[in-house]
Structures are given as C-alpha cells and as structure tokens.
Image (tube, rainbow, N blue to C red):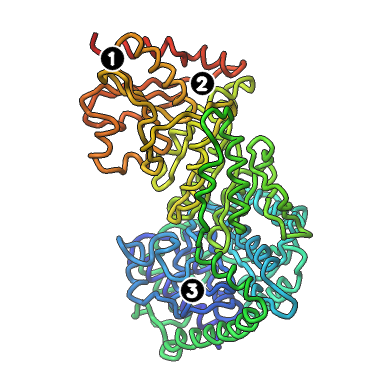
Amino acid sequence: MDLQKIANVVRGLAADAVQKANSGHPGAPLGLADIGTVLYFDVLRHNPANSSWANRDRFVLSGGHGSMLLYSLLHLSGYQLSLDDLKEFRQLGSKTPGHPEYGETDGVETTTGPLGQGVANAVGMAIGEKLAATRFNRPGLEIVNHYTYVIAGDGDLMEGISAEASSLAGHLGLGKLILIYDSNQITIEGSTELAFSESVKERYRAYGWQVLEVDGHNIPEFQKTLVQAQQNQAQPTLIIAHTQIAKGAPTKVGTAASHGAPLGVDEVVGLKTALGLPSDKDFYVPDDLKNLPELMTQKGQGMEAEWNQLFEQWTKENPQLAEEWNTWLDGTLPSLDEILTLFEPGTNMATRVASGQVLNAIARTVPNLVGGSADLAPSNNSFLHGEGIVSGQDFSGRNFSFGIREHAMAGILNGLALYGHFRVFGATFLVFSDYMRPSIRLAALMKLPVVYIFTHDSAYVGEDGPTHQPVEHTESLRLIPNLHVYRPADAEETAWSWVEAMKRKNGPSALILTRQNLPTLEKPNNWDFTRGGYVVRAEDKELAIVLVAAGSEVSLAIKVAEKVEKKGFGVRVVSVPCREIYLSQDPIYRAKVIPENVPTLAIELGVGTGWHAINPGGFVGVYDLNRFGASGPGPKVAEHLGFTVEAIEKRIQSMIKK
C-alpha cells in the first residue's frame, strides 16, 4: 500500500473541499496528511463496517478545525461518508460539518472544536480502557486491549484543560494513550514565538510522559516511532511531530495565511501539480485507490472477526461477566424504586448529605457507576464507600481523585461517557462550575448522560464570602440547551433527582445541592416529581397568589404562605426542581399547577431572570438576588440580602388585591 500516494490524495480532497465551501482550515489537513494516513491505513485497529466495535482503537482529532483531514481519512477508509458528502463540507445538514460532531458523522468519536477538549476526552477514553480491561480481562482472554490516539496542535497544548488532563494522565500511567503533537509553530496570529516559547518536551517529561520526536512528513520514521510508543505500557507517550502547515502549497506552506481560509484557486492548482495530482480534476481519487474503502473494510472485518472468536471463548468461560458486559454497554439500569423511599417527612438534612446517601445506594445497585470530585469529595459527599480509589497501580476502584482540575475533570468525564460501559459523575462546588462550562456544554451537545454534583449552592455558604457564594451559576447552567438542572428542595426530591438523572440517556444532568440543612417536606398524595414541577402546598383559602421556588427557597416559601394565609389570602406553593422539564409540559398541566389568572411570585436566592417564563400568560414577579453575597454566617447573610419571611411577605402584599 502506497501510503505517500494516499496522503497526497488526502491533501487534494481536503484542499478541494475547503475551496468549494469557500470556508475552512486547509493548513492542518495538509500538514497532517502523512500522519493521518499512517494511522488510518497502517496502525489503527478499526472496522469501518462497524464504527462501534467495542475493542477498536480510539482516535481523536483535538484540533477539530482540521476536520477535512478526518473526513478524508474516513471516506477513503470505507466509513459511511461518500465523496458527495465531502463535496458538501460545511453545508447545512451535511455529514461533514465544520468541526467533527459525534453522532453526526460515522467514525467520529467525539465532538471537538474548543481547543484542548479532545486531549481531555482522549484521557477519559484511555482511563475507560484501563477500567474495562481490569474489570473484564482474564488471563489469555484479553477482550479489552486497544490504544487511544489523539492529534493535538500548538493551540491545544496552550489551553489549560490539556495541561490538567495531561498531568493526570501521567500520574495514572496511561500507557496506551499516545498524543501526537502537530508542532508546526503556527497559530492564527502568526508564529508561536509570539506567545509560546516553553519546552513542551520538558513539560511532558515532568508530567511523567515518554517523549519522542519525529519528522512528521517522514512516513517510515513515523511508523517506527509509533511502534516505540506502543511498546511503553507504563507511561503515556507524547510524539512531537515536526510538520509544516499547508505542506505542499507553493506559497502558503509554513504560513498563518493557510490556517483558517481557503488556499485560493491558483494555490490549489500549484499544490496539485507539486503532489502529482491532476490540476483539472476536483475531489480526485485515482483508479488504483478507488477500491481502498473496500480493502480497509475487509481488513477491519477480519480484525473484528478475530476478536469475536476471542470474545466467544471468553463468554463461554465467563457467562456472568458476559451478561454484565452486555448490560453495561447497552445502558440497562436495574430498578431504582427503593432509592425513592430513603427519606421520610421530618428529616432535617442538607441536600448534599442526602445526595451522598443516594449516590452510594445507587452505586450498590449500578456497579458501572464511577466518578469523583475535584479534591472536594468530603464536602461534596461524592465518595463511593468501599469501592477503592483509581490509581496508576490499581484500576479496580470506582472513585477518581481528579485533583484540583475542574476543567480536565469535566472533559475526562465526557471521554469516559463516550467510551461506553460506564455511567459517570463528577463533583465540585457550584461556584466552580464555570471552570467546567465548555465541557458541560459539549456533553449537552453530544447528548452524554453525565451527572454533575454541584454543592454549596447559594449565599447560605456563609463565611467563605462572595467568592464562594454562587449567585448567577444556577441560572447560567439553565441556559445550556439539553442540560437538566435539578435543584431539589429536600432529601426526598434529591433522591428523585438522582433517579431521574440516572434514567436519562440523551443528555447530562446537574444536581444543585445545599450546604445547610433543609426540612424534608410533606407532599400531597398526587405529587409528580417527573414533570419538573408540582404543587407542594395547596392553598387553604381562595387562591390569591402562587409562590414558585426551587431548592432551599421552597421551605422558605411555605413559611411565607403559612403567615400570609393567616391574613386571609390563599397562597399556593409550587416546587419546581427542574425548570427545563416543567416548561416542556403540556399547557393544560402547567395551567393546573400555576393558573394564568393568578399573580405568580418566583423566589430564588440568586439571579432569577429565567423565572419570568414560569407563567407566560400571567403576571409574574421575581424575588431574586442581583448582587454578590457577603461574608458571615449563612442565615445572617440571607437575612442581610433580604431573604426573610417578612421581606417576601411585603413583596406579596404589593402584588395581591386587598
């Protein structure tokens, strides 16, 4: 197989697609064509006929702007990506969007765009391989045995998330993780000398990685370097591949001008001439390579067939493990109904404490639930008791010590969720969710069932002061499409929140939990948590106002209602633990819970802008917080900020008719 010829065809396809779209990034695909070709046509164990084969090597293009490299490789390898699809690059509804999107394109392992995310995802995938191998492999029957490869550029390695993830990867000794660094020394603004002069080699050696260097355009040398990387099973490997951006382009090679704009017609002609491709033919694949997709598919099917024989033997010898394997992969959950009855009315408990009890109860029932905290497990109540801590020497545990690396934790969780087999969670203080936001957004975009535990949810954090008192964070998270944000009012709602989050398969969930104790409320007989909102306290008199709240403000609203009703006004209290779900309910249910013809007051100890949508046909007031908090004991801070029965009662009086 003439790998150099294939690489040059990849260059031609990438240049043509960007030129036709009049949009895109040709430089990276041209510079990485040799490396990508070696990976896809010589090294990767993959089956284009089955992109979900469990024991495939994983490949991540962290610099997703270079997507035409990946699309060209996938097409020539035999994945479900036609030449016509390449011609529709960056067009609405095509299988070749501007950045690789998981679920949209066959063979794409993860959605990459924000730089550095792919590095963290790859670390998560490599952790997944180690966890699965430890759980399922038996002597002589290693059904989990593959590598994770990731290509990253200068921009990826400048981003903080890649530094955090790489540090943890070195600490864990992820020997089957191979990061190929496209060192072309060019970014959008120009040479990397403008802002990036560190020794990446020495940095990664300090992380505990094996570091190798290679000419990224010397195919035989790169093949030998990959073998050397594979042989080191004790350390992850960084391969510094020295490349030229836009390799082959006559005037734009090695320049920033090739990074994010089409080369231009004349430059493409010059490129093709230099590569020996016909300059008058677009999207050219020579006749002797047109059967390449079929050959690669046959090769991949052979690899999987060989693995299937091993898997069949393993299944016969380990029937119970095989059943577990299938259950873990298809996401089947056992019944979690018993979890819902853990708490009774009258219990006084912080929802973070209740969450810890629920989490451990679920973990005893769901053995593939794994996760950890960014150095806050005792505060987050996120430790799985008796399950061990994952370390470089032992991957049999289910608890991760992510260290103080919130950025990487979130990106790694995405990689683990993408890997398959595992249900994952991560925990930190709510105020630090900002560090995780890009990864949370991508989890929502990819429809990954990650669960986030965010504790210390309001100014009730108290003495740590405004730096640690989240004000805008809950509302900010609610803005992310496809993220379910649960802010439970008590221990019982916390149990329900966890169960609903675990049942969800098409998106992430965030649990917003208190530091302070809350009473477990009495609920009406017909309450329905699954609809996102319900009447937790019915009015005793003719309805004058509806109070709507979530989290700790629900019990406050009930106290307010009891006092106001003594003055002759009927007050209903509605708990809305998940506003996204409630707003998606049918109008009949919503009108029954919150009538349009009655004033509505939403109460939230934080920014509450989105609560105006709770009753679109009626009059809605919002009693919220639009300033930072203060340092002091939590109850006194809340009082100082105006969250008292008396203050809210005064607001109600201004809304209801006398």
The label shown at residue 655 is: 1
Q: Quadrant of residue 170?
A: bottom right
> Given this view, does label 1 or label 3 mark the residue nearer the observer?
1
Q: Is residue 389 left or right of residue 532?
A: right
Residue 326 in sight in this render: yes
- Of residue 67 and residue 218, the one placed in the foreground of this image is 67
Residue linked to disc 2? 628
Q: Is residue 65 left or right of residue 36?
A: left
Mark 1: secondary structure = loop
- Of residue 521 and residue 427, the one placed in the foreground of this image is 521
User: Which amino acid lies under the numbered mark 2 shown in the image of this protein?
Assistant: Phe
- Of residue 333 and residue 655, the one placed in the foreground of this image is 333
How far is disc 3 from disc 2 in space, using C-alphas?
A: 49 Å
> Given this view, does label 1 or label 2 mark the residue nearer the observer?
1
User: Which amino acid lies under the numbered mark 1 shown in the image of this protein?
Assistant: Met
Residue at horizontal 39 percent and vertical 62 percent from the top: 262
How far is disc 1 from disc 3 in space, using C-alphas?
A: 59 Å
Residue at horizontal 34 percent and vertical 26 percent from the top: 538
Residue 188 in sight in this render: no
Mark 3: secondary structure = loop
Q: Position of residue 25 (x, y in %)?
A: 44, 61
The reply to whether callout 3 and callout 2 are in contact (CB within 8 Å) is: no
The reply to whether callout 1 and callout 2 are in contact (CB within 8 Å) is: no
User: Which amino acid lies under the numbered mark 3 shown in the image of this protein?
Assistant: Ser
Residue linked to disc 3? 51
Number of residues whose C-alpha sits closer than 10 Å to that of mark 3, classed few (under 14), some (14–19) or many (20 or more): some
Q: Position of residue 627 (x, y in %)?
A: 47, 20
Mark 2: secondary structure = loop
| Mark positioned earlier in the residue sequence (1 or 3) | 3
Residue at horizontal 52 percent and vertical 78 percent from the top: 7
Position above or below: 528 against 631: below
